[in-house]
Image (cartoon, rainbow, N blue to C red):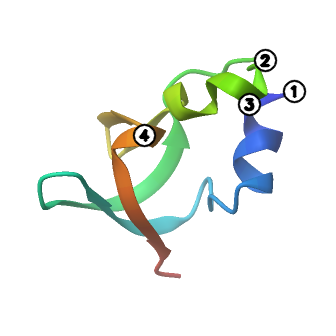
Amino acid sequence: MAAAELAQRMGLPLGHEVEVWLCGGIRLRGKLRLQEEMLFIEEERVRHLELTVDNVAFAYREMESCVRLD
């Protein structure tokens, strides 16, 4: 499945301003993007999906919450 399509199906607001809380109480604010433009990702590896908020990289599995701000 295409990584961007999978992210959208999961409700991740790619390309929008967000507030993301990561494990450990780390808060990020900025535009949510895929870390790399991956063409495909296996659905069972979705926890390893790499994302960024304003050039700060993290894995989907590290995210506690994601709220769209715009």
Amino acid at pointer 2: Leu
Tags 1 and 3 touching, CB below 8 Å: yes
Task: Kindly identify which residue carries mark 1.
Answer: 1
On screen, residue 8 versus residue 24, left or right, reads: right
- Residue 1, position as x, y percentages in the image: 87, 27
Q: Earlier in the sequence, mark 1 or mark 2?
A: 1
Residue 6 falls in image quadrant: top right
- Residue 69, position as x, y percentages in the image: 46, 81
Q: Earlier in the sequence, mark 2 or mark 3?
A: 3
Q: How dense is the environment of label 1, judged by Cα within 10 Å: few (below 14), some, or many (20 and up)?
A: few
- Residue 67, position as x, y percentages in the image: 46, 75
Element on which disc 2 rests? loop
Alpha carbons under labels 4 and 3: distance apart? 15 Å
Amino acid at pointer 1: Met
User: Any mark on residue 61, and which?
Assistant: 4
Alpha carbons under labels 2 and 4: distance apart? 20 Å
On screen, residue 5 versus residue 58, left or right, reads: right
Q: How dense is the environment of label 2, judged by Cα within 10 Å: few (below 14), some, or many (20 and up)?
A: few
- Residue 62, position as x, y percentages in the image: 34, 43
User: Any mark on residue 40, and which?
Assistant: none
- Vertical side of 18 occupied by 59: above or below: above
Residue at far right of view: 1
The residue lying toward the viewer, choosing from 67 and 24, is: 24
Task: Kindly identify which residue carries mark 2.
Answer: 39
Alpha carbons under labels 2 and 3: distance apart? 6 Å
Alpha carbons under labels 1 and 2: distance apart? 8 Å
